[in-house]
Each structure stands twice: as C-alpha cells, then as structure tokens.
Amino acid sequence: MTLPHLAGTGEGAGEGDRGPLRAAFGGLTTRGRSFLAAGGAAAVCAYVLGQPDLLRVGVLLAALPLLCVLVLHGTRSRVTAARSLTPARVAAGGETRVHLRVDNVARIPSGLLLLQDRVPYVLGPRPRFMLDRIEPGGRREVTYRIRSEQRGRYPLGPLQLRLADPFGMVELNRSFTTFDVMTVLPRIEPLPPVRLGGDANGHGEGRQRALAVAGDDDIIPRDYRRGDDLRRVHWRSTAHRGSLMVRREEKPLKARCTVLLDTRRGGYVSSGPDSAFERAVSGAASAVFHLVAQGYEVRLVTDTGLLVPGPESQAGDTAELTALIMETLAVIGHSAGTSLADAKAALRAADCGLLLGFLGSVGAAEAPVLEALRQRATGAVGFVAAGQLPPEVEGERLRNVALAGWTALPLLPGVPLGQPWQQAALELAARGTGAR
C-alpha cells in the first residue's frame, strides 16, 4: 500500500551566526584552560627568575590553545549542513529515513565534529554522530531512521554541531536555524474490494454511472478554442455559423463519497493512541484511501463544519486532494462541540453521494441531524465507536443511528475495519442502495 508523499526540504547553513571572537574563547575545555594557565605561570616565573628559556615554554603552552580557538572560530561558520527526508509523509508505524550532509567550504580542514539532531521525544532519543575531520571542500553524509506509532506533524531540527580540535583544547557549538517537518498519517487498514454504492448522479441505483467513458458527443457544439483537436470540428455547424465549431466531449462522472468524522470530545470515553477516537480517525483515513483507489471522488467533513476539499477548491489532481485530506486527518484533534449540526450546514448545498460516518456518542438529539444528512445521500453507513461502555448504552447509540435511516455498525477495538465494511456492503445491497 503506497501513500503519496512529498520530498523533504533541506536545511540551510545559517552563515550569519558567526559570533564575536570573545565568545569563541568560551569554548575552551579544561585542558585548554590548563594550558593557558600553565603558559601564564611559566611566563611569570621566567620574568621573576630571569629565565628566557622558560619564557619560550610558557609562550608555547599559551599559544597552542589560542591557535586552536582562532582556527575553529574561522571554520565554524564555513561548515554547512543539509537534511532530507525520504519520505516526508509516512503512515503510522512506517519508517522515514533522514539523510544529513555536512560540507566543509573552508580552505582548511575541520576538526572533529559531533552532530546531534533534535527530534521530538515520541520519535526516540536524539541521534548523535561523530565525524572525523573533513578536508577542504570535502563532504560527510550520515543517515538514521525514525518511526512513530502516533499520527501528527513532528519538527526535526535544528541540527546542532560541535567542533573540536585534535588536541582537545577547544569545543565550539553551532546550532542551525532551520528544521524539517515529518508528517505521520493515521494508520491505514486494508479493506475488502467491495463497493458500497455512491453512484455518480446521486440517485442511488447502486452502480457507478460514467456518462461518457470515452467521451460522448454533446448535441450542441461549442466554439473552437486554441488547442482543440481539429478532428473534432463539427463541419455542419461551422458552415452554418461561419466560424469553427467543435463537438463537446463530456467528462466521465465519478462516484462520490462523503466521509463524516465525529471529533466531539464528549463523544468518546478515553483518549490516547489506543482510544476509540484514534480508531475513528484511522477508519476515516482507511475509507478515504480505499475509496480513492476505487475511483471515488471523496470529501471529508467534521462535526465542526470543516470540509476538505472545501467548496472553493478547484478540481485538481486526485493525488493532491487525497494528500490534503490525509494531512488534515494527521493533525486533527478533539473539538469542544456537542452537536453535528455544523456538518449538516457545511453540506447544505452539496450532494453527499455515499455517506460514511465514523461516530462517537450519538444521542436522540442527533437523530434529526443524521436523518437530514441521510436524505442528501444515496446511502449512509455509520461506524459507531463501541466496546468501552455497557452493552445497553452502546446499543442505544446504534439504535439512534439506525432510526435516522443509517446502516449502523459497531466499531469494536481489536476488530479489523474490514469486517463491518463487508457487513455494510451486504446491508446496503439488501436495502437496494448498494452496488451490485
């Protein structure tokens, strides 16, 4: 199962972070400070005792850490770094490979380098790498892998770089300013290859209707536009109108589906990675991914009235629209609402096609809203969160959904979504609203 992904972005060098030379002396290690102290003491003793040879030793001891400070200070801002993610968007449980590249653009070799990349705690400990000195114009590359079982958007970086000289006199730190973002999509469950309906014209005869699979000619021709195929010129109309006219070509209509996700905090008992809410989000993502693969035109709507893609969105590439829905599901959270009325308002002027709802607690007050939504759909299936409350309470939830004209099925923990999905296809077919 392959998900669309985006290429990772690089990380700039931030060459404007060269600090004053005084700050570079703060990187002196204990050894470097000891050498300075020993050199100063030797110089004082040489002056008191009148020993010029001792003065030379003192100058040598003090010059070595000072020289290391100057060299590292000059090379710190001439070490650049870049990061790339492959892929930058991955399903929960999948791995992303992070590729780090360090370049030495200075004319002198660098010292010992220690790399540390900042990652959120949910992705594990911070990766660290030790690199040997890099020759002038040289490059070093390292790679590490990260994975997350929780959906979300996680920043990676900024990258921290520590430079050290071969003598251990100085250690200078540098932090880059930019970072990349890793998007972890909800977990996607495989679903059986059955159709639930959602015909193209929205009247529910139980099959997808393509009005023009190869392009049917419309009775009324239109004016010629630049780029039109000359083989479609309608010569009779051209002679009658005195200008070029071409035969219209209908685009095939896709089956439509609207996925309703209930995000109300009060609709779910628990929270966390294994909660019923996360299962509902995962179910919505699985349905979107599965239906798009079957050729459906899919939209997502939530109880808050969020509609993705929105009514103002232009028809675009299917992969782009799917990615937009999946990224929305990756970061969606609980809402403070108590009703599904906003979802009804968002779909007021829209034909829902097939309607799939991943619902939490549904009381009797929500039945009229669900019934109104059902009237705009060719078929409606409600997957209701279950398995966390007494059976009589959950039974009441299912009855409220069923009384609204929906096919109500429990979404139980530990039970693959494919089982209720298969049951939904059977019940829709029995009602005469499913696919044959």
Image (cartoon, helix red, strand yellow):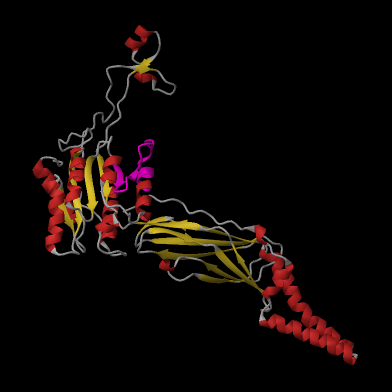
196, 109: nearer the viewer: 196
Q: Is residue 180 visible?
A: yes
The furthest residue to the right: 50
Q: Against 63, is 145 above or below?
A: above
Q: Position of residue 129 (x, y in %)?
A: 53, 71
The residue at 38%/49% (across/down) is: 4
The residue at 32%/21% (across/down) is: 248
Residue 322 on the magenta segment:
yes
Q: Is residue 3 visible?
A: no
Q: Which residues are magenta?
A: 298-323
Q: Position of residue 36 (x, y in %)?
A: 75, 82
The furthest residue to the left: 430
Relative side of 81 to 49, left or right: left
Relative side of 21 to 144, left or right: right
Assign the C terminus to one quadrant of the image.
Answer: top left
378, 109: nearer the viewer: 378
